[in-house]
Image: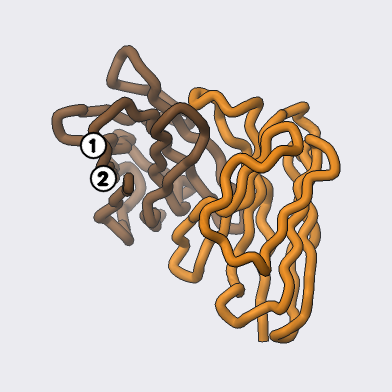
Chain colours: A brown, B orange
């Protein structure tokens, strides 16, 4: 069965630091990849998604992610984090011919002012 | 103007009770989902419905019965609640089953079984 691994469970950064959150998936075929964010007390929102084409995907709020097929990875990056980026970040993958998101266990990011 | 709404937001109940959670989306989407998020924040799909028809049932105990009266609503009924059912339940919707469609999530229902 396909799975998604997020190895960083908790990340603490100071404002203006650069961010990279790891995401690896286990599936050899065509995948569709997503990053969702859950701000404190709020629902999940889509940050960005990859289906095909340019492996470097830009999302909202200055986030980007790079799909590296050979490494089965889809890491999330932001050059300079803000306090308002404090949230839980979830990587997810869709495989097969229809919608069935498999989520990673999430990474809790705390940005100190 | 909430796109995907759930009621109630919080639900505290005793073991053995039966309870329902309601979900509505006003996006005109064809497909709706229920997810369970456990205490470790792990999100797992439970069910999906497309145009009121069950598409995915992820080996969820049959105490959980989803019902879709129309494509804008997907309710979740839980019989004989157990302690392990305590979790946050998220409803979501997407335009259709195509893999490129984004899923939009509701605010979640926090269920606590005592």
Q: Nearer the viewer, residue B78 or A71?
A: B78
Callout 1: SS: strand
* Callouts 1 and 2 close, C-beta under 8 Å: yes
Q: Residue at x 39, y 25 (%)?
A: A50
* Residue A42 as seen in the image, left or right of residue B24: left
Q: Which mark is residue A22?
A: 2
Which of the two residues, B63 or A100, is positioned nearer the viewer here?
A: B63
Q: Where residue A10 appears, x then y in whole percent?
A: 32, 61
x, y percentage for residue B21?
77, 60
> In this figure, which residue is indicated by the disc labeled 1?
A73
The spot of residue B82 in percent (x, y) is: 63, 80
Give the mark, 1 or 2, whose residue is nearer the N terminus: 2
Label 2 neighbourhood size at 10 Å, few (<14), some (14-19), many (20+)? Answer: some
Q: Is residue A46 above or below residue B58?
A: above
The residue lying at 61 percent from left, 40 percent from top is B55
| In the foreground, B47 or A63 | B47
The residue positioned 63% from the left and 45% from the top of the image is B33
Label 2 resides on the chain identified as A
Quarter occupied by the N terminus of chain B:
top right
Residue A57 visible in rendering: yes
Quadrant position of residue A59: top left
Query: What residue sits 68% from the left and 78% below the top?
Result: B81
Looking at the figure, which quarter contains the C terminus of chain B?
bottom right
The residues tagged by marks 1 and 2 sit, at their Cα atoms, a distance apart of 7 Å
Is residue B21 depicted above or below B47 in this figure? below
Q: Which mark is residue A34?
A: none
């Amino acid at each position: 069965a396909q799975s998604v691994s997020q190895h960083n469970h908790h990340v603490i950064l100071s404002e203006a630091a650069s961010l990279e959150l790891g995401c690896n998936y286990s599936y050899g075929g065509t995948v569709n990849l997503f990053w969702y964010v859950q701000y404190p007390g709020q629902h999940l929102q889509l940050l960005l998604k990859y289906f095909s084409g340019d492996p470097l995907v830009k999302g909202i709020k200055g986030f980007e992610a790079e799909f590296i097929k050979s490494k089965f990875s889809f890491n999330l990056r932001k050059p300079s984090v803000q306090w308002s980026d404090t949230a839980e970040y979830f990587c997810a993958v869709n495989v097969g011919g229809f919608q069935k998101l498999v989520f990673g266990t999430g990474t809790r990011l705390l940005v100190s002012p | 103007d909430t796109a995907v709404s759930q009621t109630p937001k919080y639900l505290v109940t005793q073991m053995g009770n039966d309870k329902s959670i309601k979900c509505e989306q006003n996006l005109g989407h064809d497909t709706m989902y229920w997810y369970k998020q456990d205490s470790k924040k792990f999100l797992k799909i439970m069910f999906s419905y497309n145009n009121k028809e069950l598409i995915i049932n992820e080996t969820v105990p049959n105490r959980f019965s989803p019902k879709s009266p129309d494509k804008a609503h997907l309710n979740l009924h839980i019989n004989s609640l157990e302690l392990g059912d305590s979790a946050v339940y998220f409803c979501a919707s997407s335009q259709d089953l195509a893999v490129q469609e984004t899923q939009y999530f509701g605010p979640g229902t926090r269920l606590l079984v005592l």
